[in-house]
Structure formats: C-alpha cells, structure tokens
Amino acid sequence: GENVEQHPSTLSVQEGDSAVIKCTYSDSASNYFPWYKQELGKGPQLIIDIRSNVGEKKDQRIAVTLNKTAKHFSLHITETQPEDSAVYFCALREGGADGLTFGKGTHLIIQP
Amino acid sequence: DAGVIQSPRHEVTEMGQEVTLRCKPISGHNSLFWYRQTMMRGLELLIYFNNNVPIDDSGMPEDRFSAKMPNASFSTLKIQPSEPRDSAVYFCASSLMGQGDYEQYFGPGTRLTVT
C-alpha cells in the first residue's frame, strides 16, 4: 500500500509565527489530500483538504499546497494561536480506493 | 446536526473476552470506515462499507476481528477473543461518497484496554 511520510514529528513555534508541516507520498494516482487536527481525547477533525487538480487552497489562517510532480503536500498555518496546539495528520486517498492512508502525525506546540 | 456517534467511549476487558464496538454514522452518509489508532502504527484503516456492503477488509488484523453493517445507521466491530495487543483507540468515520466527494468525518473513538 501507499506510504505517507510526514515531517516534522514535533514542531514548536512562537505564538503569532507560522507553522509548516510537509508530507510526501509515492503513488501518483493519489487524488485527494486531507489534513486532520486531533486534540487530546478526541477524534480527528477535518480542517482542510485539496484535490489533485488544484495546487493550493486557503481557508482563513490555514492553507494547503500540493506539488503533484514532486509528490508532496504541505499544511501552512499563519498567525498561530494557543488553540492551534494539537496533533496534525496528513492523509491521502489512493487511486481506486476509498479509505484514507495517514501520516504518523505532527505534534504542534504553540509557545506563548 | 449530530456527528458520528460511537459507544462505548471506554472499554476495559480481560483477555479472551468478546468486545463489541458500535457506531452510528452521520445521517444520509453512504460510506462507513473503521480505523484503529496506536502509538506504534498510527491510524490504520481496518474495513469500510459502501451502502452497507463491506468493500475492503484487507486491513482487518486477523479472523478474531469482524464487522457488520446491518443497516445504514448502525455498524459494529467485534473482537473475539480479545488480546492485550488489541488495546488501541478505535474510530468510526462516515462519508457521503460520490461525484468526487471524499470527506470523511470521524467519531470520538472508543478506547479499548485489554488486560
């Protein structure tokens, strides 16, 4: 099956600064790339997603970019706030499959 | 709108016992997914259903695991007999698949501890 590499595993940034998390994949048929935020004791929450026919998508302070040629996609959070502290997972849908394959997660810590 | 509902939220059982986890998907969704989350392996897809029919169960660890979806509003994941290595958080997710819609929405999970 598909392997999704996610980096970094832990990211600490000062409140107000930007955070970037990157994922790489190998299956060029992958066509859907969501990002999830998971807070302690809760289920993953979909925060933004992008399809393979789009290069960038933005929603307020959150943006996702996709480079299909290089097979990587990234989550960008600007003007970080304490409530952004959580574990973030990238995921993808392989071509021909409906289930998601997840990265190992990034623990984002916002320092006050 | 109620999201995905899972029960119980926590389950502690002894090795060898049968465990049943329950899920109610979002009303109107036609696809349901069971995932397992552990520190070692992260989030893994176990099985998913489309219109109540199991489509891919290749992620189910072994024959001790079984899943059913008797109707569009209910699914179960059963482990019999349970083993300590089954300890994990089990998530159910649902989706309205079709015409390029792929968003999956997760429930709060069931934390299973097998002693």
Image (cartoon, rainbow, N blue to C red):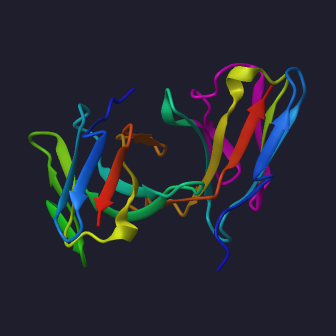
Q: Nearer the viewer, residue A18 or B38?
A: A18
x and y, in percent, of residue A31 in the image: 29, 49
Location of residue B65 with respect to A57 vertically, above or below = above
Q: Which of the 4 quarters of the picture holds residue B36? A: top right
Q: Is residue B10 left or right of residue B91?
A: right
Magenta segment: does it hold B2?
no
The C terminus of chain B lies in which quarter of the figure?
top right
Q: Does the rendering let one see residue B99?
A: no
Which span is picked out in magenta? Answer: B46-74
Task: List the single residue furthest toward the left.
Answer: A69
x and y, in percent, of residue A33 in the image: 31, 52
- Measuring 65% from the left and 42% from the top, which residue is drawn there? B90
Q: Is residue B13 left or right of residue A65?
A: right
Magenta segment: does it hold B62?
yes
Q: Nearer the viewer, residue A46 or A81?
A: A81
The N terminus of chain B lies in which quarter of the figure?
bottom right
Q: Is residue A98 left or right of residue B112?
A: left
- Measuring 66% from the left and 54% from the top, which residue is drawn there? B51
Q: Nearer the viewer, residue A13 or A4?
A: A13
